[in-house]
């Protein structure tokens, strides 16, 4: 492609993106397509000769776009948000144009130094301890795996029993912890049998006394506690594990404390939300995702560690072809995680922070929290609904409850959610809380306003009346 053609379609694509973002609310949130419909509309074999960009763009609009789920839609209330923003998109364009491989300082000095700076900005913005160092990972799942691997390495450095064999390691999570932790435990070589699920309380938060009891029992049986994972904002209900007592227990027993705040960590940009970080001095590692609630397009996961040396010792490599004269004086982020090759993710995050400012990001979060409290009030004011969990952030968990048995209620609420989503105007997902089918309404999309939330609630109320009559 010649530069003139690139320039032409570049302008055309940007115009299309701007129109897409401006008119997104007029589309269905989730496409009404059958499995296999998109693939069957495309050729089964690759083209032998070059095709014009106009044909590609037309097929994108006519075939691909009708099968896309619109995560940036103002009616997006599902899972957790995966926000983007114009500033982030523009930063991503420049990242793609540069095509930089950012594995070490020498391969892209500015990328390394900007990442170092931006991660410290984030640390300050969230009020994390001053001694923590940060690195951008692709996802929280990868960051958690890094924590589990670091915990494993630290636990096995010097520990052995009288026979000279290492004691079996154990990892502790709550009954509400994200499934990626279990996957990480398997990948890191602990084995599923090493995982201990700690009971949660009425608010779905880990019970510290149950944690300590489990650790003491394991130690008496010859196991070595390696890692405790606390969650600030669990996936099902955004429960907040009590960080200080959990941290004290982990420290007392020499276990690595990893804190998963993938979604809710962004809330700490507002000082009034930092109570959840009480006890942060006990954290060995902490992760949150700017690509969820901080207007930075996927992927961009912020991982912080208290002891950078422990992380580097876990991952560092020194093959001859990677050695440079600058190594003793700089950070080589290839040694801060699993990946050798790394994208220049810091650029789009830098664009977002600078273009919005801390105050702009705070206002963004506060508005979503206000809207979530508004929906909570709607639920509590309507006797047909039942609030299923506290609402500390942007997630409201609720269900219909007309007094029928639990099995019948689960079936009712499943049909209720299906009818809501069938409207195409909003999209929510569900979870199970203590075995009860629960609807999750997450308010966090950049484009969602109070008017959108009020309109969504009217749909929810209307559908509720219909399914209760059936």
Image: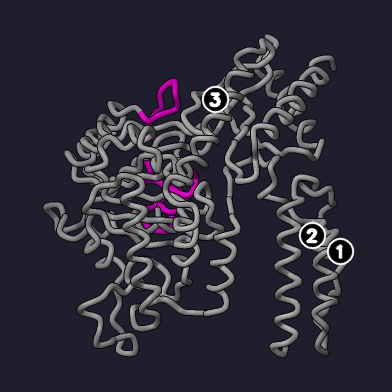
For the residues labelled 3 and 1, the Cα–Cα distance comes to: 40 Å
Q: Please say if the residues under marks 2 and 1 sit with CB atoms less than 8 Å apart.
A: yes
Question: Measured from the top left, where is residue 459 in percent x and y?
Answer: 77, 27
Of residues 114 and 247, the one drawn nearer to the viewer in this rendering: 114
385 vs 31: above or below: above
Give the Cα separation between the discs numbered 2 and 1.
6 Å
User: Measured from the top left, where is residue 294 in percent x and y?
Assistant: 50, 49
Tag nearer the camera, 3 or 1: 3
Quarter assignment of residue 448:
top right
Q: Which residue is mark 1?
A: 62
- Viewer-proximal residue among 42 and 123: 123
Q: CA distance from mark 2 to mark 3?
A: 34 Å
- Is residue 94 rendered to the left or right of residue 453? left
Instruction: Determine the residue positioned at 49% across, 57% down.
Output: 355
**Dot 1: within a 10 Å radius of its alpha carbon, few (fewer than 14), some, or many (20 or more) residues?**
few
Q: Which residue is mark 2?
A: 65
- Which residue sits at x=83%, y=90%? 49
Which of the labelled discs sits on residue 373, or is there none?
Answer: 3
Crowding at dot 2, Cα within 10 Å, few <14 / some 14-19 / many 20+, comes out as: few
Q: Residue at x 45, y 53 (%)?
A: 140
Mark count: 3
Residue 309 versus residue 468 in the image, above or below: below
Tell me if residue 143 is in the magenta stretch: no
Judged by depth in the image, the label closer to the viewer, 2 or 3, is 3
Q: Please state which of residues 423 and 372 is positioned toward the viewer in this rendering.
A: 372
Task: Tell me which segment is drawn in magenta.
Answer: 178-206
Where's residue 19, x and y in %? Answer: 76, 58
Q: Is residue 182 magenta-colored?
A: yes
């Amino acid at each position: 492609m010649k530069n003139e053609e690139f320039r032409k379609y570049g302008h055309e694509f940007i115009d299309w993106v701007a129109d897409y973002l401006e008119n997104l609310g007029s589309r269905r949130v989730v496409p009404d397509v059958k499995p296999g419909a998109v693939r069957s509309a495309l050729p089964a074999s690759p083209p032998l000769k070059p095709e014009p960009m106009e044909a590609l763009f037309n097929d994108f609009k006519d075939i691909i776009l009708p099968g896309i789920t619109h995560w940036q839609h103002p009616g997006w209330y599902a899972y957790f948000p995966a926000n983007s923003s114009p500033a982030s998109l523009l930063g991503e364009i420049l990242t793609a144009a540069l095509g930089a491989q950012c594995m070490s300082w020498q391969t892209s000095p500015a990328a390394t130094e900007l990442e170092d700076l931006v991660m410290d900005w984030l640390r300050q913005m969230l009020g994390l301890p001053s001694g923590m160092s940060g690195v951008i990972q692709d996802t929280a799942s990868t960051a958690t795996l890094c924590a589990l691997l670091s915990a494993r390495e630290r636990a096995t450095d010097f520990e052995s029993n009288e026979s000279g064999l290492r004691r079996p390691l154990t990892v502790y999570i709550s009954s509400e912890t994200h499934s990626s932790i279990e996957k990480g435990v398997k990948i890191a070589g602990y084995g599923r049998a090493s995982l201990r699920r700690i009971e949660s309380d009425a608010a779905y938060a880990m019970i510290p006394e149950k944690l300590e009891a489990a650790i003491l029992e394991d130690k008496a049986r010859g196991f070595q506690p390696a890692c405790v994972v606390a969650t600030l904002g669990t996936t099902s209900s955004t429960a907040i594990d009590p960080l200080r007592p959990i941290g004290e227990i982990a420290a007392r027993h020499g276990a690595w404390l990893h804190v998963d705040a993938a979604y809710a960590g962004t809330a700490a940009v507002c000082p009034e939300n930092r109570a959840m970080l009480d006890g942060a001095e006990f954290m060995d590692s902490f992760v949150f995702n700017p690509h969820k609630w901080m207007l930075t397009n996927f992927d961009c996961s912020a991982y912080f560690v208290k002891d950078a040396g422990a992380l580097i010792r876990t991952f560092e490599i020194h093959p001859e072809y990677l050695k440079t004269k600058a190594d003793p004086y700089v950070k080589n982020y290839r040694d801060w995680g699993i990946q050798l090759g790394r994208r220049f993710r810091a650029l789009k995050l830098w664009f977002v922070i600078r273009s919005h400012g801390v105050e702009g990001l705070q206002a963004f979060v506060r508005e979503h929290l206000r809207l979530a409290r508004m929906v909570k009030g709607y639920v509590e004011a309507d006797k047909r609904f039942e609030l299923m969990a506290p609402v500390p952030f942007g997630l409201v968990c609720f269900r219909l409850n007309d007094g029928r048995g639990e099995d019948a209620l689960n079936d009712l609420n499943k049909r209720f959610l299906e009818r809501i989503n069938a409207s195409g105007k909003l999209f929510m997902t569900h979870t199970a809380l203590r075995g009860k089918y629960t609807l999750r309404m997450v308010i966090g999309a950049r484009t969602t306003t109070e008017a959108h939330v009020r309109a969504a609630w009217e749909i929810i109320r209307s559908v509720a009346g219909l399914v209760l009559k059936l």
